[in-house]
Structures are given as structure tokens and as C-alpha cells.
Image: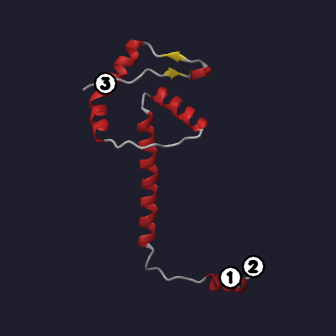
Amino acid sequence: MPVVRRSQPAEASGSSQFLPSSTRDALTSERSGAMVLAMALAKRATVYLEPDLHRALRMKAAETDHTISELVNDAVRQHLSEDAEDLEAFRSRAKEATLSFETLVRGLKRRGKL
């Protein structure tokens, strides 16, 4: 079943103009196979966005020929990837010796840093 995307205004330079039908159809058909697969596997979620964020997201989606869902998925994936890197850094340093805050402050005072 092919995916049909509603045309969205291209809000460049503050104007609201629709993409020509031939351009919209060509862009959609190139990705329709991937979109069908992604939509079949996707889970639906309700997310509340601030109006300015939603507008910026709509504009970026229109300009980059991506759906809002694709942009949100990419952002969440990037954020989780950063979290995974942080967790790995914590794990790799787990066996390092710990230093109490009081000991740290005493050492700074002793060396004339405080």
C-alpha cells in the first residue's frame, strides 16, 4: 500500500506556497518503499511541542523532504546515543579510586588553590 503524504506549505522567506505536484510526487515516490516499511514497524506516540518548536519542525521537514516523525526519530536516536556514550564512560571509570569532597577541598587549600 503506497504512502500518500499531504502536501505541506514550503514556508521559505515567510511565504506559504505549495510545492508543485510533480515535484512532490517525485520526492514521495523515491522514498515510498522505505516509508511503507518504517510506518509498518513504527509505534504511535503523542508528544506535546511548544508552538515555536512545532513550527520550526514543520518548516525543517518541508525544506529537507523528511517527515516530522523522521526528524523526531533522528533527534531521539542522537540523544540516546549520547546517553549510551556517557554510560560507557562511567562504566570504564567505575574501578577508579574515589576521592571525597572534603579530601579534595583540603588538598586544594593545602596547595593554595583556595
Q: Locate the N terminus and report the quarter of the image it occupies.
A: top left
Say which residue label 2 marks.
114
Give the CA separation, mark 2 to mark 3. 63 Å
Give the total number of marks visible in the rendering.
3
Q: Locate the C terminus and report the quarter of the image it occupies.
A: bottom right
Say which residue label 3 marks.
30
Question: Who's the residue at 31% across and 24% down the image?
Answer: 30
**Number of other residues with Cα within 10 Å of mark 1, as a class: few under 14, some 14 to 19, many 20 or more:** few
Name the residue type under label 2.
Leu
Look at discs 1 and 2 and give the one toward the viewer. Answer: 1
Callout 3: SS: helix
Q: Is residue 13 left or right of residue 111?
A: left
Give the CA separation, mark 1 to mark 3. 62 Å
Depth check: give the residue in front, 84 or 107.
84
Depth check: give the residue in front, 10 or 109.
10
Question: Who's the residue at 49% across and 83% down the image?
Answer: 97
Q: Is residue 26 left or right of residue 11?
A: left
Q: Which is more N-terminal, label 2 or label 1?
A: 1
Callout 1: SS: helix
Where residue 15 sits: x, y (%)? 59, 18
Callout 2: SS: loop
Where residue 10 sits: x, y (%)? 52, 21
Q: Give the answer, above or below, for where 25 lies relative to 76.
A: above
Q: Give the answer, above or below, for where 94 lies relative to 29.
A: below
